[in-house]
Image: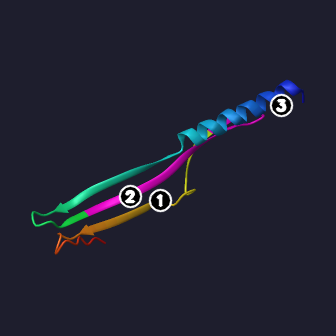
Amino acid sequence: MNMNKINRKIQSAVVAAALVLGCASSANAAITLVQTEDGWTVQLMGLISAFTGNSDFDNGESSTRVITGFNPSKLEAVVVAPEYNGMTISA
């Protein structure tokens, strides 16, 4: 294997790693299910972590895939009570 081919592969790997790190993100979402006039609120929130992986193989094939599970995804419900004596309680 000549040095040009090795340098090209190293450069490609560095560029691919920079793109993957730059494109890694997570999607946050929150939905208010109930909000009453007396101050009660019920929300549903979530976080889905995903990133892409690109591979180039020696036989000329390449692949792109979306990967999840590196950071855990979560779903949570939040209930906020109305303020009482200067204190707000949520769970």
Q: Quadrant of residue 52?
A: top right
Highlighted range, magenta: 43-63
The C terminus is located in which quarter? bottom left
| Residue assigned mark 2 | 46
Residue lying furthest left in this view? 37
Give the spatial CA distance, label 2 vs label 3: 43 Å
Is residue 48 shown left or right of residue 31? right
Vertically, is 89 above or below 21? below
Residue at 43% in and 62% down? 74
| Residue assigned mark 1 | 73
Point out the tag, 1 or 3, that comes first from the N-terminus. 3
Residue at 32% in and 66% down? 77
Point out the tag, 2 or 3, that comes first from the N-terminus. 3
For the residues labelled 1 and 2, say whether their Cβ atoms are less than 8 Å apart. yes
For the question of whether residue 58 can be seen, the reply is yes
Name the foreground residue: 65 vs 78: 78
Q: Looking at numbered disc 1 in the image, what kind of residue is underneath it?
A: Ser
Helix, strand or loop at disc 1? Answer: loop
For the question of whether residue 60 can be seen, the reply is no
Is residue 32 shown left or right of residue 21? left
Q: Position of residue 9 (x, y in %)?
A: 77, 32
Q: Quadrant of residue 87?
A: bottom left
Q: Looking at numbered disc 3 in the image, what kind of residue is underneath it?
A: Ile
| Residue assigned mark 3 | 6
Query: Magenta stretch: residue 56 in it?
Result: yes
* Total numbered circles: 3
Q: Looking at numbered disc 2 in the image, what kind of residue is underneath it?
A: Gly
Considering the whole magenta stretch, tell me its main secondary structure: strand
